[in-house]
Amino acid sequence: MKKIHFILALLGVLACTPGMPASAQSDFPTAQQWNQGVVGWNLGNQLECSAPGQDGESMQIGCPDGSINAETAWGNPKVTAKTIKAVKAAGFNAIRIPVRWQCHITNANAMSVDKEWVARVKEVVDWCLKEDLKVILNTHHEKWLEGRPFYANQEENCQKLALLWLNIASEFKDYDQRVAFAGTNEVHVRDNWNQPTEENLAVQNAYNQTFVDIVRSTGGKNAKRHLIVQTYVCNPSFGLDGALIVPTDLPENGKKYMSVEFHFYNPWEYAGEGTQEFWSDEAGLCWMFDRAQQEWGNTGLGVVIGEWGVTDHGSAAKLDEVRQNISYYCKTYVSEAGKRGFSSFVWDNNSFGQGADKFGIFERWKNMKLRATWTMEGILAGKAEIGK
């Protein structure tokens, strides 16, 4: 990690973190305050797409021809202000914007980002803020980073991650505190979602610390911005019992301005594959949420459920009954998360039909028509339960 600090010092950012007058510090919500009551939506399969014609698993860092059109590469239309307005009108109060940066890098040595892509991301963020939606901005599908959680790659990856976040954080440093940053996504060895090794965990923890260090070093509003760090593969179980080492923040911040993120499609057979038609394991859901509260929430950290959802499924004979059950699941999920002060962001990939990975809620090709009404009804019912 010494080389990370050398990079920071060379760029002149470690020694120039500006302070803030005491009167301004009240404008900075703690992570727990930021998360309170947040029921969010994921802009899935849009800004995190690979460049047109590029393998989505490619670790290539660069800016191939046509990369500015990446957001439509996976079959979705371009995001518009109407997209965001529809999300707000439906009842959500926050949006998580997954972003792939690796196919928009103009200089791999400096991890500099194509200015046209930065402008596009800012445009979408600005639309969210205009609707008074909170925003999570992350690095998503950075395959060079996510797919190599090994000691052999740790130093190089941490250096590149530091430079990438230096560029992102500098571009967004003047944005207000409705905008939060999330350092990584689902770091894992390709096609291996199982229990991580000690090496895997150590590399994820190094990524988290690098992210916090570099963002804080840019100063200004970033000195107290809500920062979100991840468990390995964003599996909550892989962060419990100290497996996730909470990064050291600035001394004056303590743990107040940081959240732990996990993703929880549980059980996967029901939520992701759809092979299990019905769900009734409220106790299992609450057990995991309680563990997260005990491990992180009770220590002053925020908790962000960055992704969750239920694929549309069910046999034709039972479809109405299954969708009623999905609605109940969504209500239970959102209300139990919210009652513990967790923010939650449902996954929407604009994919419809019956079976695995059909997480669509709004039809983006049909002017954001709300199609999964059963999902939305459950989410709103759960939102109404928060704070009761």
Image: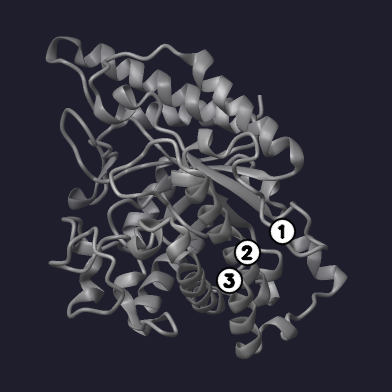
Question: Nearest the camera: 209 or 315?
Answer: 209
Q: Residue at x 39, y 66 (%)?
A: 124
Can residue 3 be spotted in the picture?
Answer: yes
Cβ atoms at labels 2 and 1 below 8 Å apart: yes
Q: Residue at x 18, y 49 (%)?
A: 366
Tell which circle, 1 or 3, labels the residue nearer the N-terminal end: 3
Question: Nearest the camera: 340 or 197?
Answer: 197
Q: Residues within 10 Å of mark 2 (few under 14, many from 20)?
A: many
The answer to whether residue 296 is above or below residue 316 is: below
Q: Residues within 10 Å of mark 1 (few under 14, many from 20)?
A: some
Q: In the displayed structure, does residue 244 sit left or right of residue 285?
A: right
Cβ atoms at labels 3 and 2 below 8 Å apart: no
The quadrant in which the N terminus is found is bottom right
Q: Name the kind of residue labelled 2 in the image.
A: Val
Which residue is the site of mark 3? 175
Q: Residue at x 34, y 21 (%)?
A: 326
The answer to whether residue 34 is above or below residue 25 is: above
Which residue is the site of mark 1? 248
Q: Residue furthest right?
A: 22
Q: Name the kind of residue labelled 3 in the image.
A: Tyr
Q: In the displayed structure, does residue 34 sit left or right of residue 327?
A: right
Q: Residue at x 70, y 55 (%)?
A: 257
How far apart are the alpha carbons under marks 1 and 3?
23 Å
Which residue is the site of mark 2? 212
Q: In the displayed structure, does residue 13 sit left or right of residue 189?
A: right
